[in-house]
Amino acid sequence: MAFTAIILTMLFFVFESGTAGDSCGEIMVPMCRGLIGYTHTQLPNRLGHKHQRQVYRFLEPIWPFMDRGCSNNLRLFACGLTVPKCTTKGNTTEIELPCKETCFYSKKACSKDMKSLGMKWPRKLKCKGLKRKKQKKCLKPYPRLKKKRRPIYAYCQKNTFPMCQNLTFDIGTLPNMFHQSRETEILKELEQYQRLADSQCHDDLWFLICGVFRPYCIASNPFTLPCRELCEEVRGQCEATYRKLYGGLRWPAKLQCHRYPPASSQHTCVIPKDTALIKINN
């Protein structure tokens, strides 16, 4: 245990020191990690964030809009501005910010969605000062979608995510509570937790995470979430390890336990030992 603690502490300092200074550091914020086409960044950014903990707090309010897909460029723009692309060539470190068009497309497509939910486009997400894509050396926008991306409904389908196999329940439903329905995107987000799972902080970590990102389908309820009590138990045993492994970031917003129903509520929830519940087969 002492050796494991030493290793975790070393990893914490490696990731934390890699977020500020002259070198490129691994991107750890969950709304960007593995989802934007590059893996490393350098801080401080142009907004003055010195650590990814600050980036996380800044991006958290617009995370739902990234998942909802108001623009296929919002994630690239918001992440590109706060955790800009960092590459090292020899002794030279290069930083790339989003192109001005990446900003324009995101703002035009998402401002109305934000307004409809009582939120304004964040003041600090400015297009001013960004390069045009014709100038190169910036993160070019994806081609704009002609129509707003619609959810893909997958009602009580076999869960094919590799980390979600051999669980008590193997059938799930999409979209999830975060309006995510595309399996490729969800898988990339699930993969972020592999490092935490490898720490073996809790035996039922994957049961919780898989049930959050693809709610379980059981006979009485096709959209069944893990119980709050399980979430609280997993968080209690894994939160400190998460902070050490992920550069001091706080426990992810999507795993905040108040989101999930307690076992005593009228809403059905499940724990791994609920083997008496009838599974739905393909």
Image (spheres, rainbow, N blue to C red):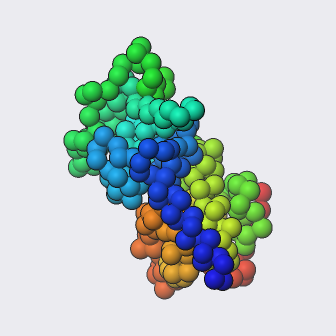
Residue at 66% from the left image edge and 78% from the top image edge: 3
In the displayed structure, does residue 93 sit left or right of residue 169?
left
Above-or-below relation of 88 to 137: below
**Residue in front for this viewpoint, 267 or 145:** 145
Q: Quadrant of the N terminus?
A: bottom right
Find residue 53 and report its image quarter. Answer: bottom left
In the displayed structure, does residue 174 sit left or right of residue 112?
right
Q: Residue furthest top?
A: 134
x, y percent for residue 210: 62, 63
x, y percent for residue 24: 50, 44
x, y percent for residue 184: 63, 44
Confirm whether residue 191 shows in the render. yes
In the displayed structure, does residue 7 sit left or right of residue 68?
right
Confirm whether residue 207 shows in the render. no
x, y percent for residue 74: 40, 37
**Residue in front for this viewpoint, 152 or 243:** 243
Q: Residue furthest front?
A: 91
Above-or-below relation of 114 to 130: below
Residue at 51% from the left image edge and 81% from the top image edge: 236
Circle count: 0
Q: Quadrant of the C terminus?
A: bottom right
**Residue in front for this viewpoint, 48 or 141:** 48
Residue at 44% from the left image edge and 31% from the top image edge: 96
Above-or-below relation of 181 to 176: above
